[in-house]
Image: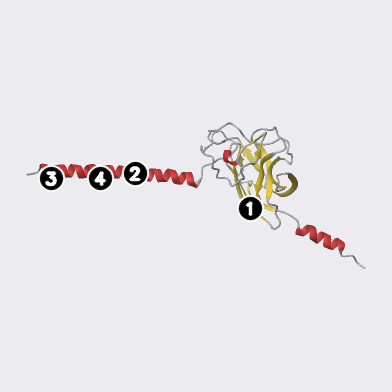
Amino acid sequence: MISLKPLLFALLLLSQSFGVDVIEPITRTGWTSSGPNDILWQNTTGDPAYFRLQLAQNNQTTFTASDAITADGIIVNFVPASYLFETITPSCKSGQADTGVRLPTGTGFTLRFLATNEDGTEEGQLLGTSEVFSIIDSTATYCVATTTSTSSAPSTPSTGSGSVSSGDLLTSSPSHVGAIIGGTIGGVLALLLLIGAACIRKHVSVLLRSP
């Protein structure tokens, strides 16, 4: 008689398997050392609630630790899987201009999604890996002096040798662009009103002087 236990066990493992479809980064676009760098993914059934993002180069995850990356390649920790989007800008910190912090550069990089327990402890299961991409050196970047991040990351991801909040990883966003456009339009309207008022005063003055 054939035992069904091995088959049932295999089906159980399959039902509990996790996975992430990584959309970005991709080979064609790549990253810059200063950022901003976009990360996009799509969840599959059974994904854990959180994961960590680990950078690897030529399948190696040993780096010189900095404020941008840990010695084992972690660049963001405790990311909610439901967000589907993350932006990292290692060169920016809240309320500051370019701090000079950079990601390592070169070719042969991949981004790994590692499962994380809800309490933030490491689980280690590999959920997905990006395409191979390059990181090119970049100098200046635009840093917004605010504590609100365009990234949907939680408030306490750990990056590099220290811990920084997601508000420290800032990029320009549609809200900032909207504020700039709104301020410009408001200024133009105010100028037009002043010109109109001056024209009206001049016209009234001419009428009063005429016999």
Tell me the kind of residue under disc 3.
Answer: Leu
Q: Mark 4 points at which residue?
A: 196
Separation of marks 2 and 3 at Cα, in angstroms: 29 Å
Residue furthest left in the image: 211
Q: Nearer the viewer, residue 40 or 203?
A: 203
Separation of marks 1 and 4 at Cα, in angstroms: 53 Å
Image coordinates of residue 153 in percent, x first then y, are 61, 45
In screen coordinates, is 145 left or right of 76? left
| Picture residue at 51% right of the left edge, 45% below the top | 173
The image quarter containing residue 110 is: top right
Image coordinates of residue 40 in percent, x first then y, are 62, 49
The quarter in which the C terminus is drawn is: top left
Q: Do the residues labelled 2 and 3 touch (CB within 8 Å)?
A: no
**Image height of 129 relative to 35, above or below:** below
Tell me the kind of residue under disc 4.
Answer: Gly
Dot 2 or dot 3: first in sequence order is: 2
Q: Are marks 3 and 4 in contact (CB under 8 Å)?
A: no
Label drawn at residue 207: 3
Image coordinates of residue 10 in percent, x first then y, are 82, 59
Separation of marks 2 and 4 at Cα, in angstroms: 12 Å
**Image height of 139 relative to 128, above or below:** above
The image quarter containing residue 194 is: top left
Q: Name the residue under label 1.
A: 82
